[in-house]
Each structure stands twice: as C-alpha cells, then as structure tokens.
Image (cartoon, rainbow, N blue to C red):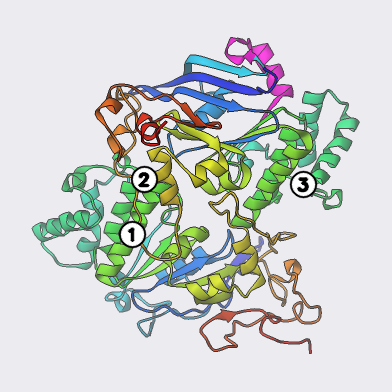
Amino acid sequence: MYFPIKTGFGKPRSFVHAVDDVSFVMEEAETFGLVGESGSGKTTCGRCILGLTNPTGGMVLFKGKNIVGQKGKDMRGIRPQIQAVFQDPYSSLNPRKTINRIIEDPFKIHTTLKEHEIREEVVHLLEEVGLDENFAYRYPHELSGGQKQRIAVARAIALKPSFIFLDEPTSSLDVSVQAQILNLLNDIQEKYGIAYLFVTHNIHVVKFMADKIGVMYNGKLVEVGSKGDVFENPLHPYTQALFSAVLELDPDAKVTRRVLQGEVPTPIDPPPECRFYKRCWLAVNGLCDVEEPELLDTKSNGHYVACHVVNGKSPS
Amino acid sequence: MSDQLLLVKDLHVTYTTYLGSTHAVNDTCLNVKPKEAVGLVGETGCGKSTVGFAIPRLLDPSARITGGEILFEGENLLEKNNEDLREIRRKKISLIFQDPTAALNPVYRIGDQITEALMYSNELTGKEAHDRSLEILSQLGIPSASRIDKRYPHELSGGMRQRVTIAIALSKNPDLLIADEPTSNLDVTIQAQILDLISDLKSKTGMSVLIITHDMGVIAEACDEVGVMYAGQIVEFGSVGEIFRTPMHPYTRGLIKVANLVGEKVRLEPIPGTVPDLRNLPIGCLFSQRCPLVEDSCLKKRPELIDIEHGHLVACPVTIRQRGG
C-alpha cells in the first residue's frame, strides 16, 4: 500500500512505498511470523488487514471474501473475527476504564447478551488468561505490564475470533514475563484454533512461536516459507544477514556475521530496482538494478524468495 | 591495588517516593578491572541502572546513597565534592544511554556536538577539536566524505546516532565507559555492529566498559564478566562463560532457562511469583519466596556473595552446600 505525501500544494507529489506488493497466505490456527526491522512495513501490513489503514491497492481475502474498503454493515459478521494485541500494554488499555468495562466492550458492541451474561463471560475470560476475578474492578495502572497484556489477550479472544494480529506483544516485557505470555498465547491457540499474525523483530521469539515465516525488507516481502525451511536454509541475502546478526545466548558461539554496509534506502518513490541492491553482495549489475525481483518458489517446495540471483535469472 | 579500576562495596541506594522509601540497591558489590567489559544484567526494577548512574554520581535527586563505597582508581567517589566529580566525569568516566536521540541536541550539527565535547574535555582549540572529531568519526567507520559532521541528529538513523554518542563519549579516552542499554533501541542488524565497535575500541584504548542490560544476548556477545542483579542485589558474579555454562544461583538458572527459546512450541517455565516490594524487604534472602531450593535458614539471614571457585561468586548458601563447598 502506498501513503501519499503532500508537499504543500495539496495534491500528492511523492509516495512513501510503505508496503509494496506484499502477498502471503495464512492457514487456520497457524502462526505466521512476520519479521523485519524498523521501517520494513510489517506493522502497516497488519493495520491494513485490521482495517485501521486503507490500502492503496490490493486485497485482503478473509475466508475467501475481500474485506478491503467494505462498508460497516457488510463487515458486521466479519469484524469480530479479526482482533489485535499490540506492543504497548500501557497505551492499548483505556486508563479511565476498569478491567471489566474494558473486556465488556466487545460484547456490548457486537452481541445482544444481557448484563449478567456478559459478566459471566468476563469472569470466564479472566480465568482463561490466568487472572483472578478480583482483577475485574482494578484500573490498568494498577496492573503490571504482563498482567496488562493478559487483559489485552482476554479482550482479543472475547468474541472467539479466527484471527489475531499480534504486533510485538512481548517486546516491552521482561524475559520471564514474556515466557508467561507466550505460554498463554500457545495455550489459547491450541484451545480455540486461532490463527496468529505475529509481527516481531525478535528472531528468538519468532523461531519459537511461528509455523511459517515471512521476512520483510523496506516494504517488500523477500522470503516466505515454513519455519524449518527458512531457518535451516535462508535463501535471501537479507535473511542471511538478519539471522547472522542475532545475538546468541552462547558466549562461545562463533558467528560469521554478514555486516550490511550502507543504510536502508528511502521508501519514497523508490526506483525500479531490487530494494536490497545497494547493500547486496550477490548483486549483478544490469539485472538487480533494473528490475524488482518477484517472489518465486522455483523448487515448488513452498519456500519463496524474491531474488534474481537465487532464482537463477540472468541479465537480459 | 593497581588492578582495581572500579570497586563498589556494599552500596545502598534508596529512592524517596510518594509511597515511601524504596530500597533500589541493597548492599551491592561490583568489581571492574582495567581493560575489562563487565555486564550488569537483570530484569526491570532490579537496580542495575541505579548502580550505573550511582557510580558517576548522576542519580536523580530523589535518590540517596545511604551506604557503601564507590572506589574509582582507589578514591571513594562518595567523598568527593562536586568540582572533583565534574573533573572525573570530564576526563575519566563516560556514559552512553539507551536512546541516542535524547542524548543529542536536536538543534546543533553533529560536528559541533563532538567538537564541543572535545574542547571541554581535552582543552583543544576549535580547529584542533574539529580535526580530531573527523578523525574519531572515521575510527567509527564513518568516512568524512559522508559529511555526517554537517548533519543534524534527525537526519541520521538510530544506529548512526548511537555511533555519534559513542564518538562523543570516547572523545576523551575515558578509563571507564558506562553503557546503559546501548543497543535496546536499535535494529537487529545494527546491534551486533555497535557491540563489536565498543569491543574494538576497548581493545584499542584499554578502557573498561560497564554494560547495563536486560538482554542476555548482549552479555554473551560483549562482556568478559557479568553480575546478575535481583531486587537490588548482585546474586551471582563471574566470567560470562562460567555463568552461561554453569549458572549457580536459582534466579540465574531460571533466567537463562527462560531466555533460551528453542525452535519449537514447548512449554516454557517462567520463574513463579513476583519481585518483592522494595519498600518492605523481607529479612532473609530476597529471592526466597520464589526459590525452588528455599530452606528455613534462607528466611533468617540474607546471603552474601561467596567465591565458590576462581572468581565465580554466588549469594546462595544452599547452592554452595549442595555443591560440597
């Protein structure tokens, strides 16, 4: 999707290509890990799926139906099925509402349940996320970061969604609390069969949680495949550089790092070349600087990569 | 003792808050030798940043150092007056922080900021400082051709800004660099580069580094020795290899176990319970309520750091006894 930038005269002159031609498929009850560094477009992807931002082009097919640009009443049955948990537990919960009011909201908006029925649901949800019913009357500021995230999860699963977008859900949590939340997310997924789009820059976490992985760079999806395939055999040079930069918890580990020279190119009106061209050690002049590579599965094994060289293309 | 650069003894720091005094740092001891990188690792609120800022006496006014000594090059910094402390900060101790953007003045060009630091710490003239600043930038892998010196902070990426704060911090060839979460705000591919840079400069200049972080990966990558902090105390200290291979304190073991995410969805074992209320510390061991090895004696007396072998220190008599020590 493209964001227009206005340069003073009202009509857009340039575009920030935040997310460019990104396509991927998610199965039911699957965890798709979307990794990338800052500015890669991974959060924007999620926001487009949620309908928080309108894409400039393309489709989001949810259970076969395109949900892009749909009007309110057409989305009525669908909206509750698509939920989100965000990174910052401090700003995603209304500080002026008690916990019970926060969790009651989805029911009040989307169902016709009576008050006492909603209250039962709230208690049940608190239990699901491992919190005592006494938490119902507390305010968010009285909770720890981990507890807040549990509330965010409770709210997200209230209407039994089939899809949850999780944007760095544990990045602001301590390692021990992170473990608790990841356990919770896995338990919930196993119990309710919910698909997760898990966005993170933490490679250890994505290796733990994901079934499938997509790697984004500067608005483009450069590699997609099963977790096993992508980690054992990273094909795209950027993926290799990214994985080699991960800090292992082993002081004796001998790692050969692929150090990336230069900076991420600007996403404003990018020229028609591979976005990774200027930093790539495989780059071929006359090929990589004239045409954007397509995401292809040349071996037909479900492992896609967007790289001319890896996909065996030669300069024309 | 010539092999002591920094020796922190029984440091005690309390913060005065609306709800009472919190004991942020409790009887902490730390030893940083020359040319060494020491890490201070722990979760939120364990007191590691407080220790880091206490050393150059840059704590918030609400903090009070209520006990202990901070011996820097043999002299107790807690007995120094403001003027002497400023001299020490000018020449000998440097700091870099988590957010490089907040550390740089947004309305001054990069070159001017480095030059200013050089003129203040090294007493160079404007021209000398300017030339030296370009030299330092190139040592950090930033060629003068890139004209970084003419840019403003907002024109640089996060990684570049952190490189600049490192340039400023190192411009005076300090004896000690204190780095508080130096890579937490940076992208994955930049993190390793910045840590390599710090290690490289440490070898070249012979300075010592104290790295404060919650990230075990940073410790494994960049440190020689590490202290594990819990509720304001160092509960274990030793070489990084030892601590990762044979962690002894139950908290360290729990932490390493939970930080090691394998490649499949197994059940993780988080450390049960929560950190004690720092306003009302229990009498005995501060980890006792969450500890799988807890015994009666743990609740009566707070354990001290004891050297088990070759500089591996643990504050847990139960562990020491079980190992036959």
- Tell me the amino acid under the disc marked 2: Gly
Question: Could you say which quadrant of the image residue A248 lies in?
Answer: bottom right
- Tell me the amino acid under the disc marked 1: Arg
Q: Does the image show residue B109?
A: no
Q: Residue B91 in magenta?
A: yes
Disc 2 target residue: A145
Question: Which residue shows up at 45% across the image and 80% down it?
Answer: A25
The chain letter for the residue carrying disc 3 is B
Of residues B158 and B259, the one nearer the viewer is B259
Q: In this view, does B132 lie to the left or right of A84?
A: right
Q: How many numbered marks does the figure carry?
A: 3
Q: Is mark 2 on a helix, strand or loop?
A: helix
The chain letter for the residue carrying disc 1 is B
For discs 2 and 3, the disc positioned in front in the rendered view: 2
Magenta segment boundaries in residue numbering: B75-94
Q: Is mark 1 on a helix, strand or loop?
A: loop
Q: Which label is found at residue B151?
A: 3
Question: Which residue shows up at 52% across the image and 86% down it?
Answer: A301
